């Protein structure tokens, strides 16, 4: 399904339409809502699960505009307004987690609970080895995008990871939305970055699972159980 909002067209899917409580899933850089297929399978019996392809990614549109986490955040806010979703649980992975953190500062009333999987506020919150590899790919795309139109979009999307997002840790201090910060012990995000996000959220739980950045797909049983326990808990 497609929806026109904010001068773009977003692709989305809905599962478990018979359920009333909503979970919205926001994917990571260069991916699509299909990343959450194991969460869709697990949660759609009880929840209405909506996966959204972010602007310029998956099957959603990109018209050459500069991308930012803030712009994508406004897209998701507009999506909720158009779909008449007054409040939802949000699960965000990587860039998706960053979008949710930005939304927490713009429209916290839309979020009942937030699951922040592998997010980072600061670019230096990525481990040094990851930043070096990302920078190499960035410069390759800078060159190839001069003569390959397809790489222009890839560069625009990749650039989302190459800078701080438009909020500070302190912007999270007054957020009253319960948040789960969940990462892998071998994540590409530094433990210090995850700790800072957790410590600056006023209502937060931190879980570190054995795994990589991609725990939601690679160890989905443990990830889904952690999310379920958090949704059923009062912290």
Image: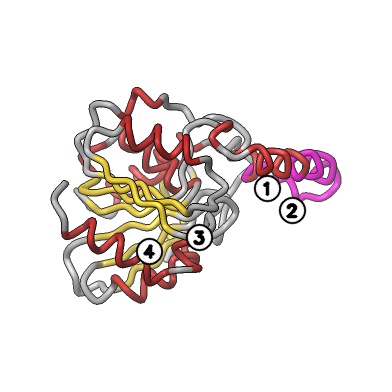
Tag 3 secondary structure: loop
Q: Earlier in the sequence, mark 3 or mark 2?
A: 2
C-alpha separation, residue under disc 4 versus residue under disc 1: 31 Å
At a point 34% along the width and 44% down the height, the residue shown is 78
- Image position of 225 (left or right of 117): left
C-alpha separation, residue under disc 3 versus residue under disc 4: 10 Å
User: Which residue does the numbered mark 4 point to in the structure image?
Assistant: 223
C-alpha separation, residue under disc 2 versus residue under disc 4: 34 Å
User: Which residue does the numbered mark 2 point to in the structure image?
Assistant: 150
At a point 35% along the width and 23% down the height, the residue shown is 170
Task: Tell us which disc is closer to us: 1 or 3.
Answer: 3
C-alpha separation, residue under disc 1 versus residue under disc 3: 30 Å
Can residue 157 be seen in this snapshot?
A: yes
- Image position of 187 (left or right of 183): right
Residue 96's place in the image compared with 19, above or below, is: above
Task: Tell us which disc is closer to us: 4 or 1.
Answer: 4
User: Which residue does the numbered mark 3 point to in the structure image?
Assistant: 211
Discs 1, 2 touching: Cβ within 8 Å: yes
User: Which residue does the numbered mark 1 point to in the structure image?
Assistant: 153
């Amino acid at each position: 399904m497609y929806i026109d909002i904010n001068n773009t067209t977003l692709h989305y899917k809905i599962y478990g339409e018979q359920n009333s409580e909503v979970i919205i899933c926001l994917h990571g850089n260069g991916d699509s809502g299909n990343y959450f297929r194991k969460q869709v399978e697990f949660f759609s019996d009880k929840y209405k699960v909506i996966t959204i392809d972010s602007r310029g990614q998956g099957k959603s549109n990109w018209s050459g505009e500069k991308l930012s986490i803030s712009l994508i955040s406004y897209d998701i806010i507009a999506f909720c307004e158009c779909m008449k979703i007054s409040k939802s649980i949000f699960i965000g992975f990587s860039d998706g987690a960053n979008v949710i953190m930005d939304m927490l500062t713009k429209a916290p009333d839309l979020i009942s609970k937030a699951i922040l999987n592998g997010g980072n506020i600061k670019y230096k919150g990525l481990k040094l080895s990851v930043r070096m590899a990302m920078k190499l790919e960035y410069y390759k795309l800078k060159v190839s995008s001069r003569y390959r139109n397809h790489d222009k979009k890839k560069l625009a999307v990749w650039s989302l990871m190459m800078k701080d997002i438009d909020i500070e840790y302190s912007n999270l201090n007054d957020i009253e939305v319960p948040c789960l910060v969940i990462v892998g012990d071998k994540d590409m995000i530094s433990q210090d970055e995850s700790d800072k996000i957790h410590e600056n959220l006023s209502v937060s739980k931190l879980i570190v699972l054995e795994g990589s950045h991609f725990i939601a797909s690679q160890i989905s049983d443990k990830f889904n159980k952690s999310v379920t326990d958090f949704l059923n808990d009062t912290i």
